[in-house]
Amino acid sequence: MSKTDIRSLSLDQIKKFFLENGHQEYRADQVYSWLWEKSVLNFEQMTNLSKSIRAILKENFVINHIKVETIQKSKDGTIKNAVKLFDDLLVECVLIPTKNRITACISSQVGCSLNCKFCATSKLKRMRNLNPDEIYDQVALISDQSRDYYNRPLTNIVFMGMGEPLMNYNNVIQSIKMITSKKGLGMSPRRIVVSTSGIPKMIKKMADENVKFKLAVSLHSAIDDVRTSIMPFNEKLKLSELKLALQYWYSKTKRIITYEYVIWKGINDTIEDAKALVDFCKFAPSKVNIIQYNSIDNDEFIQASKSNIDLYQNILEKNNINVTVRKSRGQDIDAACGQLANKPS
């Protein structure tokens, strides 16, 4: 029989294990600290435990820690990691350094549940959801790399890697609880952004659960027909449903909504497209990040001209909507937004 991954157990369950095996329950606190605060790879590293306790742990449990398969470093300092999971599947996570922050871009699924045509990850079959510890490990890995490569702490986390986070809701939420826990990495939830393509039911669920992290929506068009043409799942999850969910989110949380938006030539680069975005944004305080398109070798999608991007920016600003035009990082190693697809290095 395969052994249980000890990180799938709660602290209370580990305490119960120790009591049932004739050991004091404070040993569970020691183990828990090694597993989450220190992110150890094996039981032998738990040096404040006796050999006999380490032996009983090895007899009953495993630690299915991620393993770094390859590391690529961009000319702009971005670092992309391909990490192997316990079942030999691969996902990618990225360290993104800028002057004032270091951000970890984290994956939540092997492949993706959705079918956005402009995203390389959507070309992969969704194999499975990541477990909470597999998500956590990515953050711990990049936190270590941040100090090793840049002598600076990790400051921010974005769930913008492979997969749709809200289609792996429970595991993502559990991972964030551990990432923000004092018994884990102790990061502030306000430094975490969960980016979704828009799953109305789950956005409402997050609002009801009063989560403290920030929400970003990968929007790309505020016109149903256009959005469906590039994000086919929109046929079932219409913009009207998404808007209602976001209105609910704001009514419950009073937190600003960020829209991620790519402008493509001949797809969504007209005045009508920009005005539709303005209308969509007006129901609640929001900001728009206009993101540079990162090619995935698909001739259908071409970055809009600078004049059309300027047009969008001007229309948004005239309507008092906060807008930022962002340049992508890590393009030369396929580490930018939309490019994560486990390509060979």
Image (cartoon, rainbow, N blue to C red):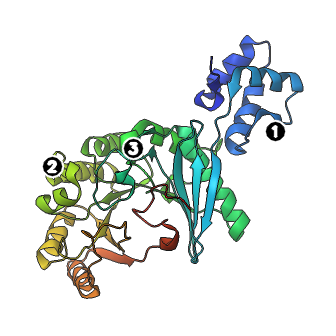
In the shown orientation, is residue 209 left or right of residue 76? left
Residue visible at 57% across and 74% down in the picture: 100
Q: Check disc 2 and give the amino acid type.
A: Glu
**Residue situated furthest right in the rendering:** 51
Give the labeled residue for mark 1.
45
Q: CA distance from mark 1 to mark 2?
A: 51 Å
Q: Check disc 3 and give the amino acid type.
A: Asn
Q: Could you tell me residue 79's position as x and y percent?
A: 59, 66
Q: Could you tell me residue 139's position as x and y percent?
A: 59, 52
Tag count: 3
Mark 3: few, some, or many residues within 10 Å (few <14, many ≥20)?
A: few
Is residue 196 or residue 266 the one in the foreground?
266
Element on which disc 3 rests: loop
Does 5 sit above or below residue 262? above
Judge depth for marks 2 and 3 and give the one in front: 2
Task: Name which quarter of the figure residue 16 lies in.
Answer: top right
Question: Which of pointers 1 and 2 lies earlier in the amino acid sequence?
Answer: 1
Q: Check disc 1 and give the amino acid type.
A: Gln
